[in-house]
Image (cartoon, rainbow, N blue to C red):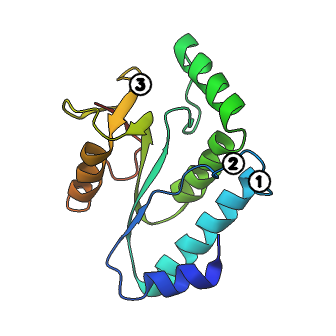
Amino acid sequence: MDPEAVTATLDGADAVLSTIGPPATRNTTLKPDDFGRAMEHLVAEMNRMGLKRIINVASTGTRYGDERFRFMRRVITTLLNLAFPIVIAGKESELAVLSRSDLDWTTIRSPLIRTGVGGSLVVGDTVDLGSRVDTHLLARFMLDELESDTWVKRAPFVAS
């Protein structure tokens, strides 16, 4: 959320992996629009520095464009909004900024991220892939996507 820190961090970068998550507490002064403004600054700095690739993590409750919510997705989104009131709206704000940009973006919509979940990673366009994703599998997918254009300008769901 600090524009000067973003600029300094991008110096010498080839791409961006963003894993900004919910605030540590519900008692925060952050608003959903703060996430969008931070992404606007990041996109502007990436453009200024000639960086094209960004992979961003959002929640499984994040809606992209005019997607329709099925019943289970509405339930998940309601629960996430109760637990972390600014996260989904904030991530939707980030995704809106990215989708308007010329960057080669991918926003990964993830369920609960945990270490030790195991299994294998499932990636797709539908939300009903699972309720958890393994930290290591998610990180590997993000790194692999740096060299792939399979999910460029798309917002896949993941689970393991």
Q: Kindly indicate whether the residue at mark 3 contacts the one at mark 1 (C-beta within 8 angstroms).
A: no
Disc 1 from disc 3: Cα separation: 26 Å
Estimate the x, y position of residue 85 in percent, counting from the top left.
72, 38
Residue at image mark 2: 25
Is residue 150 something that shows in the picture?
no
* Local crowd size for mark 1, using a 10 Å CA cut-off: few (<14), some (14–19), many (≥20): few
Estimate the x, y position of residue 2 in percent, counting from the top left.
65, 76
Quadrant (top left, top right, bottom left, bottom right) of the C terminus: top left
Q: Which one is in front, 111 or 95?
A: 111
Residue at image mark 3: 131
| Residue type, label 3 | Ser
Q: Which one is in front, 135 or 15?
A: 135
| Residue type, label 1 | Thr
Residue, x 80% and y 57% (percent of image)?
29
Q: Which one is in front, 131 or 109?
A: 131
* Local crowd size for mark 2, using a 10 Å CA cut-off: few (<14), some (14–19), many (≥20): few
Residue at image mark 1: 28
Disc 3 from disc 2: Cα separation: 22 Å
Is the residue 50 above or below the residue 73 in the image? below
**Please, what secondary structure does the residue beneath circle 2 have?**
loop
Q: Viewed as shown, does residue 32 lie left or right of 147?
A: right
**Please, what secondary structure does the residue beneath circle 3 have?**
loop
Residue 147: give its label: none
Q: Kindly indicate whether the residue at mark 1 contacts the one at mark 2 (C-beta within 8 angstroms).
A: yes
